[in-house]
Amino acid sequence: MPTPPELPTPTVTPATALERFERLRDQYRMGIIDLPAFTSALEVYQFPDEQGVLWTIGATSGSWYRWNGAGWEAGHPPAQLRLPPMPLELAPDAARPALAAGPAPQTGSREKRCSACGTWSIGKKFCTSCGTRLG
């Protein structure tokens, strides 16, 4: 069979990308993932636009930056960004078992284990991994 002349390119809005990034950053802040895993995941948060300009979210600021060919500069991304290919180790199904284990809670802490996926959440009303309401 011949290859189709065009294949759909998955896209994401900057707001959706930022929302997903915030969930990832919450997992790092709560100790669910460690610094090497967080840093590795940040590599996935680089999105090309229609012209091929690369955009990313600042790890601490949550602001958008564009690659100007020599360095990152603050900017406002276009309405749609292309999704980069996701490495297998960062794919949602592959990552969920590693995130579900999480750290053991401290005695007397505000940590709760999600009944749906087993992830530990600190002081949250909803699970940061799957979104289930915590009891």
Image (cartoon, rainbow, N blue to C red):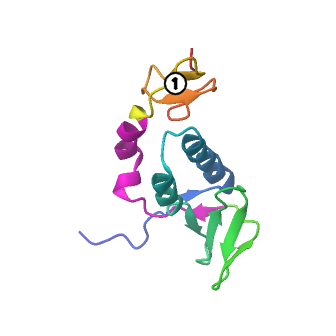
- Is residue 44 covered in magenta? no
> Could you tell me which residue is drawn at 50 percent across and 35 percent down?
129
Q: Position of residue 69 (x, y in %)?
A: 63, 85
- Where 25 falls versus 62 (above or below)? above
Q: Which segment did they paint magenta? A: 80-99
Q: Which residue is mark 1?
A: 106
Instruction: Specify the quadrant of the image occupied by residue 67.
Output: bottom right
Residue lying at 56% horizontally and 65% vertically, measured from the top left: 46
- Which image quarter holds the C terminus? top right
Left or right of residue 12, residue 74 in this image: right
Residue placed farthest to the top in the image? Answer: 135
Q: Please state which amino acid type lies under the numbered disc 1.
A: Gln
Can see residue 78? no
> Quarter holding the N terminus?
bottom left
- Picture coordinates of residue 33, whole percent (x, y): 48, 44
How many marks on residues? 1
Horizontal side of residue 19 vs 102, given as left or right? right
Quick check: 46 left or right of 104?
right
Q: Is residue 44 above or below residue 99?
A: below
- Where residue 56 sits in the image (x, y, percent)? 62, 65
